[in-house]
Amino acid sequence: MENRTLKDWIIASRPWSFTASLIPVIAISSYLFYQSRIFSWECNWVNALLALPMLICLQAAGNLIGDYYDHIRNVDLPGSLNQVRHIQSGKFTPKEILHYGYWMLAVAAVLGLVILSRSSWSAIWLGALGLAMVYFYPWLKYHALGDLDVLFGYALLPALGVSFVVTGVYHWEVLLLSLPFGVLTVAILHANNTRDILNDKRAGIKTMPMALGARASQWLYAVELVMAYVLVLVLFLVGLLPAPAFATYITIPMAVSRIKTMLTAEPLAEEPIGGLDQATAQMQMAFGIIFTLSFLVATFI
């Protein structure tokens, strides 16, 4: 076994993907701040801060547990384009990665209990669902339900949970507000799974792109990216988003570039879209940060 550094342990958790869990917390917290200035809501911002490491640990757990099961199911093989090398290279044993994932899950659970003790135990169902989404993700992914898991686990549930632990009330409109960045988070996974159609077919699993077919999957990716901007317009028209949210349209050139990469690739060609999942994560981060800042700008103008 090679010597491992702290950097190796961090890289194994795939920190480049953590924007998927950070954006729901900061975006919804920003919305709650915006609304609290209008309606004088009492907000517990410490709970919002605690939610950040909790969701990062949840996502790290999901990444690690997923990597373990992908390895034992022979989904990840030498030469695959997903850049998951920490088991294949011998840097970590499969069991180390699994146990690492479970430890991250345990830390997330402890942080969740702390947050609930500071708010209300009545929201424990949200925490239980969040843990279940992580634990059962490999099975859901292998049965074409991974996209749905990601939408709930990294958009809808965090948004609703943050709104409750910060204000003590469920603000159901945050489910709609989480959709613009939520569909982009789903697109990260979708880009990954579209690239891996042939690899996943060989491994005997079934993802959403496999169920749809390669070309339809490429078009669905394009629809997901376009949908984020359409949702901004719709949410503005129904009064849920302030006008500064249109600043997210600054990222449209990023979306166009990624859509072009996806649609011009030959169906089942892996190499042209090899890094599209990470490129989509970068776009989701830019979109999400601007989306977050739009509420702060609206608060003070």
Image (cartoon, grey):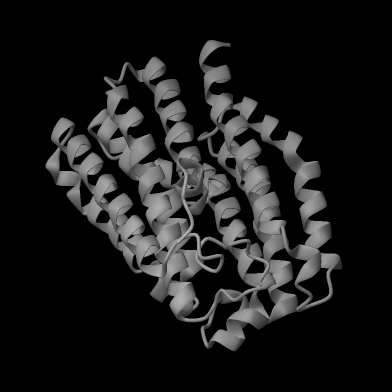
As drawn, 271 above or below 72: above
| Residue at image location 56% in from the left, 41% down from the top | 235
Residue 159 picture quarter: top left
Residue in the foreground of this view, choosing between 58 and 95: 95
**Picture coordinates of residue 131, whole percent (x, y):** 29, 57
Residue 201 picture quarter: bottom right
Tell whether 18 sits left or right of 132: right
Q: Quadrant of the N terminus?
A: bottom left
Residue projecting furthest to the right = 264
**Picture coordinates of residue 35, whole percent (x, y):** 41, 23
Tell whether 243 sits left or right of 270: left
Residue 50 picture quarter: top left
**Picture coordinates of residue 68, whole percent (x, y):** 42, 69
**Picture coordinates of residue 161, whole percent (x, y):** 31, 42
As drawn, 210 above or below 38: below
As drawn, 203 above or below 35: below
Residue projecting furthest to the top = 300
Say whether residue 211 is visible: no
Number of numbered discs: 0
| Residue at image location 41% in from the left, 42% down from the top | 173
Q: Quadrant of the C terminus?
A: top right
Say whether residue 36 is visible: yes
Tell whether 59 sits left or right of 102: right
Residue in the foreground of this view, choosing between 216 and 67: 67
As drawn, 193 above or below 275: below
